């Protein structure tokens, strides 16, 4: 186990903040107490990305910020913050997004060491690009980013991600991983990486550079001078409807030949899914069609789909290609436990799924339902 008596350096609790902004403040002032209802007003931006923008975890493109501003009825510039202003405090700004649970400092240190070790590994081998790591080890770019920024304790990564980390760092299991990180920390290999990740001055300088670049991009949008961009009125598109009942309460993504009109401006990858059987009870009958947006993360109290394994396609689909397969989905209700962990469950069959143990790309929010 790693020694914890002497942490590598003081933790920078705001290391993930790259874009403090006024989006949350403006959203609440506009009457949207929660982000999810507001996200329907900016359908071009997936809910997950919109959440990251509001939380300051990503820097938006100028067009994205202009569309958010237009939906809120403000100038795009009004959503920016002068981080050098005397009244600005990163602590106050980040407080609404803070995790209420007390941090586990040993595991925080382990996550930070792991992040530094992967950065060190990639620096030593320039062939390990983001695309190469996804291809060779199966670590999706969004997951790699979270690991490299120590945004989640190691124990909260699922077994597949943990195994990929072992392979990337050339160890066999968690004890050997901890031993390797201890060695790298002791010999100074991780010092430079940790210093960059944990240096508020470096973070602040990068933040200023990003803000300046974004202000320049907004100024060059060619808008009408009040933060608005020309957005054509939405056209009603038709979403394909899939869904054939499969075993164990699953629904296969088999085309039904039906479509459903998208009047609400759902996400670009949204689709219809016929329920097939009432796995959640009578409240969601088998003849219902739900709208699934794979780019939106599920929310507590709502419904979601969990993508399971693929199955052979129907006979008419396999005539051209016998190896054709289709995805299967499980429709679940979403809840959280008292520790804030999110779960999905179905009634028939009785199954409970821990979302933290599933890659985010296997989860999608159900944003609407039609009873036909």
Image: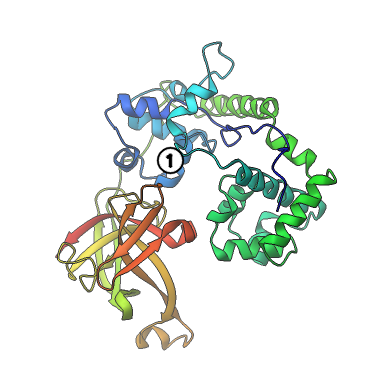
Name the residue nearer the viewer: 8 or 193.
8
How far from the left and from the top, in percent, is residue 18?
Answer: 58, 33
Q: Residue at x 78, y 46 (%)?
A: 185
Up/down of 198 relative to 79, above or below? below
Residue with the most extreme front position: 5
In the picture, the quarter occupied by the C terminus is bottom left
* Residue drawn 61% across the image and 45% down it: 150
Please indicate whether residue 367 sits to the left or right of residue 171 in the image. left
Occupied quadrant, residue 294? bottom left
Q: Position of residue 359 (x, y in %)?
A: 50, 60
Q: Is residue 46 visible?
A: no
**Residue 108 as seen in the image, left or right of residue 45:** right
Q: Residues within 10 Å of mark 1 (few under 14, many from 20)?
A: many
Q: Secondary structure at mark 1?
A: helix
Residue 286 versus residue 336 in the image, above or below: below
Residue bearing mark 1 = 50
Q: Quadrant of residue 137?
A: bottom right
């Amino acid at each position: 186990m790693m020694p914890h008596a002497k942490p590598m350096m003081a933790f920078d609790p705001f290391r993930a903040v790259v874009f403090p902004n006024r989006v949350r403040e403006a959203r609440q002032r506009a009457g949207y107490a929660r982000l999810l209802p507001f996200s329907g007003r900016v359908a071009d931006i997936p809910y997950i990305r919109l959440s990251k923008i509001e939380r300051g975890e990503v820097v938006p493109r100028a067009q994205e910020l202009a569309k958010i501003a237009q939906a809120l009825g403000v100038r795009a510039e009004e959503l920016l913050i002068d981080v050098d202003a005397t009244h600005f405090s990163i602590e106050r700004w980040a407080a609404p997004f803070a995790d209420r649970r007390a941090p586990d400092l040993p595991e925080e240190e382990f996550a930070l060491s792991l992040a530094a070790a992967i950065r060190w590994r990639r620096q030593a081998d320039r062939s390990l690009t983001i695309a190469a790591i996804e291809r060779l080890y199966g670590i999706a770019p969004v997951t790699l980013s979270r690991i490299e920024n120590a945004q989640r304790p190691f124990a909260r990564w699922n077994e597949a991600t943990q195994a990929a980390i072992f392979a990337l760092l050339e160890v066999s299991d968690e004890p050997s991983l901890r031993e390797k990180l201890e060695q790298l920390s002791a010999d100074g290999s991780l010092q430079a990486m940790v210093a960059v990740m944990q240096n508020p001055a470096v973070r602040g300088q990068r933040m200023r550079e990003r803000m300046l670049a974004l202000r320049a991009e907004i100024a060059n949008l060619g808008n009408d001078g009040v933060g608005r961009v020309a957005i054509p009125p939405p056209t009603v598109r038709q979403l394909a409807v899939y869904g054939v009942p499969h075993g164990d309460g699953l629904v296969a993504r088999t085309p039904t030949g039906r479509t459903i009109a998208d009047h609400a401006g759902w996400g670009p990858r949204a689709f219809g899914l016929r329920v097939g059987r009432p796995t959640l009870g009578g409240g969601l009958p088998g003849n219902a069609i739900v709208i699934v947006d794979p780019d939106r993360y599920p929310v507590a109290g709502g419904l979601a789909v969990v993508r399971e394994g693929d199955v052979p396609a129907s006979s008419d689909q396999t005539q051209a290609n016998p190896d054709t397969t289709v995805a299967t989905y499980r429709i679940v209700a979403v809840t959280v436990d008292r520790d804030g962990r999110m779960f999905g469950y179905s009634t028939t069959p009785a199954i409970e799924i821990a979302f933290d143990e599933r890659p985010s790309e296997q989860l999608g929010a159900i944003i609407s339902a039609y009873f036909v």
